[in-house]
Image (cartoon, rainbow, N blue to C red):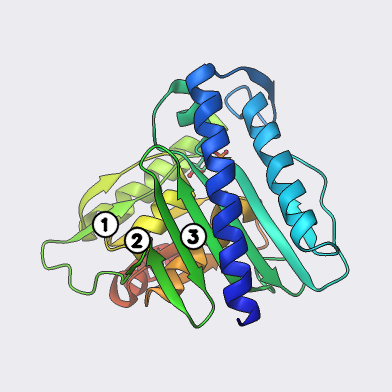
Amino acid sequence: MSIVADLVELAAAVAREAGDLARMRREEGVHLAATKSTLADIVTDADREVEELIRARLREARPGDGFLGEESAADPGSTGITWVVDPIDGTVNYAYGIPAYAVSIAAVEGIADPDQWQALAGAVYAPASGELFTAGRGAGAWLDDRRLAVTVDTPAGALLATGFGYDPATHDGDLATVRSIMPIARDLRRAGAAALDLAYVAAGRLDGYFERGLKPWDFAAGSLLVSEAGGRVTRLDTESLRPMLVSGGIEVHARLLDILGDET
Ligand code: LIP
């Protein structure tokens, strides 16, 4: 089996096991462990436990690989491959009991910098729905055993998704961005989990998605899903504190860049 296929298989298996643990902990009751950048930026005991499980499984399978996760210390590794992991993306949804959350695991090659790495494999597992989205570089994007493709035509306007950061001071600017986008939109969705938003773009459930301020683990796997499903993903303002991620089918992605590129 190719290295990409091996990495996809490992990411999928670990994402499923980790997601089943997250779902079990949710059913038992979620406990707030700490807050991070703001009071709204929370981490639960389950976030930490799930990341520990993922890290242990990946270390068992591929000792020497690097690790870049949301809840634990980064490790550059020695193999040139780094795992970029969000144990529970959509943490606020998870804490409130909203079933829109996912385990996001990606394997990237090169420097663990989203503007320099080459994503090789990704898995996004939604425990509440049981849906497992996977992608391998050059091997397509899949929902279980169904091949995924982004949308092409949006005659009624684009069904778009976005999100807002944890700092209320950024909300006014982000709402201004939404206002600038609405002329090309048929409607807007705000599900609260970037990895799922990107998976839905890859699956054709959304025509496009944009959001400022995402962390590498929010989008590492989902971005590969979109590109392997025939879509495009671009990061704008990469030197700023809140880079803008833009994704969609080729035409919607271009229209979003026309508007958002002027804002930068
Ligand atoms: C979340 C993203 C979401 C964004 C939130 C947060 P987390 O990631 O998935 O799209 O709007 O601000 O960044 O914190 O749940 O891993």
Question: Do the residues under discs 2 and 1 have CB atoms within 8 angstroms?
Answer: yes
**The image quarter in which residue 10 lies:** bottom right
The residue to which callout 1 is attached is: 205
Residue at image coords 43%, 23%: 97
Regarding mark 1 in the picture, which secondary structure is present there?
loop
**The image quarter in which residue 80 lies:** bottom right
Q: CA distance from mark 2 to mark 1?
A: 6 Å
Q: Which percent across, then down, holds residue 93? A: 45, 30
Q: Which percent across, then down, holds residue 252? A: 30, 69
The residue to which callout 3 is attached is: 222
Looking at the image, is 164 positioned above or below residue 243?
above
Q: Which percent across, then down, holds residue 79? A: 83, 72
Mark 2 belongs to which amino acid? Val
Looking at the image, is 175 positioned above or below residue 247?
above
Q: CA distance from mark 1 to mark 3?
A: 14 Å
Residue at image coords 74%, 64%: 82
**The image quarter in which residue 98 lies:** top left
Does label 2 or label 3 sit earlier along the sequence? 2
Question: Do the residues under discs 2 and 3 have CB atoms within 8 angstroms?
Answer: yes
Say few, some or many: other residues with alpha carbon within 10 Å of mark 2 (under 14 / 14 to 19 / 20 or more): many
The residue to which callout 2 is attached is: 201
Mark 3 belongs to which amino acid? Gly
Regarding mark 2 in the picture, which secondary structure is present there?
helix
Q: How many marks?
A: 3
Looking at mark 3, is its residue's CB closer than 8 Å to ligand 1?
no
Residue at image coords 82%, 45%: 73
